[in-house]
Structure formats: C-alpha cells, structure tokens
Amino acid sequence: MSEFAFLNGNEAVAWGVRLSRPHVIAAYPITPQTKAVEKLSSFVQNGEMDCKYLHVESEHSAMACSIGSSSVGARTFTATSSQGLLYMSEGLPYASGARLPIVMMNANRSIATPWNIYGDQMDAMHVINSGWVQLFVEDAQEALDMVIQSFKLAENHDILTPVMINVDGFVLTHTYEKVDIPGQELVDSFLPAIEKAPHLMNDQDPMSLCISAGNQHYMEFKIKQHRDMFKVFEQLERIDRDFEKSFGRSHGGAADGYRNEDADVILVTTGSVTGTARVVVDSLREKGIKAGLVKLRLLRPFPSDDLYELIGKASAVGILDKNISFGFEGTVYTNVNSSLLQKGYRGRTFNFIAGLGGRDITKENIEEMFSALLEQKGETVQYFNMGCAL
Amino acid sequence: MIKKLNARNIDAKECFYGHKACGGCGESLALRLALKVLGEEAYLSLPAGCMAAVSFIYPNMAFKNNAVITPFASTAAVATGIAAGLEALGKEAPLSVGFAGDGGTADIGIQSLSGAIDRGEKFIYICTDNEAYMNTGIQKSGLTPFGAATTTTPAGKAIHGCVTEKKNMFEIAAAHGITYAATASIGYPEDFLNKVQKAKECDGPAYIHIYTPCPTGWGHGSKITVDLAKEVVDTGLWFLAEYEDGEFRLNRKPGDFKPVADHLKRQARFRHLSDEEISQIEVMRDRKWEKMLKNWG
C-alpha cells in the first residue's frame, strides 16, 4: 500500500533508499545533503532498515567503503554534495571503471571559493567525465522514484555503471512536497534482490578488481566502458515503462519535452528550475507565443538523438546553465550546442547562465530568456539576475 | 587456545605467486607469509604501491585471493567496506585484510585507517614498512628513519639525508584502543606468523606493522633482506611488541644491542653517515628503549 506524505527532497531520497533495501550505506554529512543521511541513520537505528550503515570519517572514505561493499556484490548507497563530491572524486572513476553499480545522491551545491552552501550545479559538472551516469530530477517525487529506478539501472548487467542522482540543493532538498511513498511489496516486486555480476569478488572464483592495464589494453577497457554507457538510454526507458505499469506514474527517459512539438523557441533545463520554466511556458502560450521546454534528465550519457528530436525545427534554443566552465561557457550549453551542431541543427543557440550560489531564478528571468530567444538578440552567453554591474 | 605456528606446521599452500617484485623484496615476502596464515578466503585491499603494481597487471593476476587495488588513501576504508558488504550479504565471519606500505599507511592513508579503527569493525591492516615511497622511486615518507638518504632527502652537502624520525604508527594505532596491534619483522617470521594468527582470531580491528627491507631502495644485496630484518631488531633499531587488552608488551628485550654502525653501513642509504650521526641514532634508540622498558616492561 502506498501512502502520501509531506516530505522534503532529502527525505524523499531517504525513502527511496529505504524501499530499495540496500545492504550497505556509507556516508558523511554535508549541507544540504545532511537530512538525507540523518533520515537514513534513523531508519537504521530504529530497525526500520536492515542494512550496514558505515559512519565514515570523510567523503573520500564514503566512496572507498562503497567501492569495497559494491565489489563483493552488496547493494550500496551513498550521498554527498559540493566539496564532498570533489573530495570523493578520486574514487569515482575507480567505481565506474570497476563497473560497480553504486547509487549516489548528490545534493547540487556551489563550490568554494567564495564559500557558499546554496544550490547550483557546479559540483556535478566538475565530475561529468567520471564515468558515472548523471541524472537530474525535478521534484521530490521524481527523486524518490529515481532512487529505485537507478538501482535497477546500475545493476543491469549490460550497464554496470554507477549512478549519480542530482537533487538541487535547498530548492529540492529542503522544500516540502506531497510525495507518494510506494508500498514495500510493490518496490520489492519491481526491484528484485541484486544479482551479483560475474566480475565481482566471490568465494567460488576469486577475482582481482581495479586492476592495472598497460597501454596495450587500457584503451579497450575504456572504449568498452564508453560504449556500455550508451545502453543506459534504452534501459532507462524500459525501466521507466515498467515503473509506470507498477506504480502508475512515469518520468520518461533521457530527455523530456513540454509543449515543444510546435515550438518556435525552446528552453533546455536541468533539475528543479524546470518547474518554474513550465509555468512560464504556459503563460507565454496563453499570449500566443510558441514557447517550449526540454528537460534534460540525463547529462551522461548525453542524449543527442532524443534532444534533436525534441528540439526539432525551433528557430532558437536557449540552454539554462547553473554552472560556468571558467574561461568558456556553461557546461550544459557546450554539450547541447555540440550535439545539435552534429545533428545539423540550423537555428541559433544561446547560453543563459543563472542561479549561481543559490541566486533565485525568477519567472521574470525565464521570460527574459524567452524574449532573447524570440528576438535572437544579444551575446551568445548571457547572465541573469546580476546584482550589480561588473 | 590459538595454535602456535612454525616452519613445520605452516600451510604449504601459496596464495601470492608469479608477481613481478624485485629479487629479495621484503614486502612480497611479508605478504606471502601472511597469506599462509590468512588463507585464500581472505579478501585483500591494497593501495597504489609496489605490491599493487607487481600483482595486478592485466591479464596476469598474482593473488589466489579476491583482491582489489584501492584509491591510495583508502586501504582501510575499502577493507571495511568489503567486510560490511560480505556481512550484509550473510557471510559468516568474513576476513577482510588491508596491506599498505609506509606511505599508504602513515601519510596519505592515516585518516581512513583511523576512521576504520574507530568504527570498531573486524578487519586486519598490515603495514609493510620499507621506510620510503619505493614504487615511485624512493622518496621520503613519514616512516623514513633519521639519516636515511632518499631521492627527496638525499645526502646533500647542507642536509645529510632525512632529518625527521619515524612516526610511531604502532602506538598511534594502539592509541585508538584497537583490539590488537603488533610490530613484526620478516627477520623473525615465526613471530610475525603468530601475530597474524592472533589478528585473524581477534574480535575487532587489528593492526600489524612489519619491517620489510627493500634492496632497490636501501641499496643492499637481495640475499641479505631477511638478515637485515633480523639485525635491525638485534641492534634495537626496531622492536617486536604487542598491544592487547589495553596493554603494551615487548616480545624481545635484547640484553646487548648488536653494533648499529655495521648494520647501517650494509645499506647504501646510510653510507654517508658520519660517526657523530651514527652516535645520534644510538642516542635516539636508547631513549626509545628507555621509554619502552619503563612503560611497557
């Protein structure tokens, strides 16, 4: 039996984890992820979850413990944010290269310095090449559901790739929403016990993991890993379809369009800002403006085909980035722009950088973005809601 | 009662072979001996370092056991993760063992070791101490002894080798209130084997610090590795001790120390030392022994 509850994004993640029945959780607290690990700790301490909870001394060890437990076939979860993600980043390619199906929540947050605890997506972009699936969610319900889906995805033997679920700091982690918590039996039937992959450590046929490979072998390992990453698209869609059959709701595949079919101008978003953008698109449509939206759910693997299909023949596309790759542009823009160019897209693309360090992205900001797209005016890279002239 | 191990009753099975370590490598001998006690059911974690470099070169794997190369700072964390995973999957009394060198233990890995001991989980950590970063080309670590020349503390005209003393890793591990800790040397293999056996049997985290000469890094003949490892105990420059039930115990109290100078001069890393510097090393040794005999007697 499912039940509705009033949960913030962190608690929704914790419920998703609880329902997924991990064997091991290793985590270190960091704002704004703390409520997630506190909730999980209380589940364990109250006997509501039967799992080993490792109170580690750092994020570096959180990832290392996760590598250890996942390498013997245990379903493993960890959570982090910002500097914590950067601190554990050494371990990320160990996990992905060893094909360990770890699931991690990353509460998206800015990166020092200046120090700032609020939400943007600089942290996720910092580790975009770590070989992890990078998934962005829009609300607490999607966060809960995607934890369950992510274990199924990561543990698929064709994928065997760790998944990072990005949950916007504060906007999602600390905002309460009505969330449907699925019943345990339903989740159990959707997400069966983890099936040990043959390359993992086991008593019958001992394995060496995280091995070294010389220049005569290394490249093949990496290309294999790269190619398997593309299998995520198909599997994620299949998992979502199955999820819908069981749970009655769907979150789609790698990218999701909203009023995009006949749109002249389209804004591409990731994460929580999508909700605000939907409202703006609706109001522009009421005025007869053909505005549309594409929500990127996956940044790795990058859904080039889906994206082009969703953007279609729009005359201009704006890409909203809550990050900057210093000395260049927003990282999502780089990806979208490159992908569209390869597909032969002929419209103009703009990069809208906003919301750094938790700065609000208002409806008015998004309206301005659409104006820029409609008029196709201004610089390719534009900054929004600046507090002072620079 | 734990069965005492010796040359006659030790397991003939090998779990570590075909590796590419240098001739006379002390570290590989320590691993080989330890695995005879730990058995092939032990799960091994090793960070970047000589033992990882010589054992995991695809497609030639040198361990009979399950084994993993860990991020450099993470030997203890990965080992406890493995233990937790196995336990959560229902394996009874899983045996998870970390092997790391002096740098991987006393420098970059000390935080994860401390955290893992603090959690009180059952795992064994064996530090194979060859007193410098040998895999990267003999650079100073936190366990390089006073006077030793390394490539980052060469015997220069102004500064004559390493100016710091070894970090007391054994005492640092013990200070956590660890279940079992010990020092050992491959010069006294029976002592080492029995300490590994104790670590295996104990109910909680265990730390063993073993002295493992390195012919390449120290500049000595590969034939005298074990001899040097015995001599270092007989000269008092290393000691055999245990920490158990909250108490320290010396396993060997040499009456007269063998001459330090002869021992040091057999190693190229100490050949530059003046008589005065050798005397300084003796003073340090005597001070250490005075404390140990007084406090651990």
Image (cartoon, coloured by chain):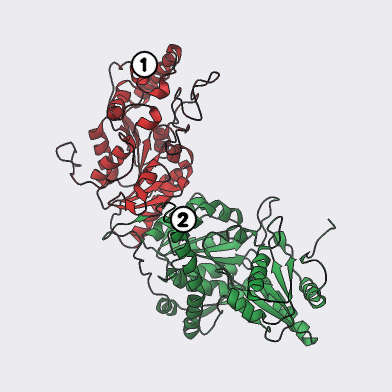
Report whether residue A6 is seen.
Answer: no
Front position in the image: B250 or B161: B161
On the image, numbered disc 2 is attached to which residue? A94
In the figure, residue A191 lies in which quadrant?
Answer: bottom left
Same chain letter for marks 2 and 1: no
Considering only vertical position in the picture, is B133 above or below A112?
above
* Residue indicated by mark 1: B261
Specify the subunit that label 2 lies on.
A
Mark 2: amino acid: Tyr
Which chain: red? B
**Subunit under mark 1:** B
Q: What type is the residue that disc 1 sits on?
A: Ala
User: Between residues A343 and B172, which one lies in front from this camera angle?
Assistant: A343
Q: Residues within 10 Å of mark 1 (few under 14, many from 20)?
A: some
- Residue depicted at 45% across the width and 15% down the height: B277
At 37% across and 53% down in the image, what residue appears?
Answer: B58
Say what secondary structure mark 2 lies in.
helix
Image colour assigned to chain A? green
Real-space Cα distance between discs 2 and 1? 46 Å
Q: Which residue is pictured at 68% across the width and 71% down the height?
A: A273
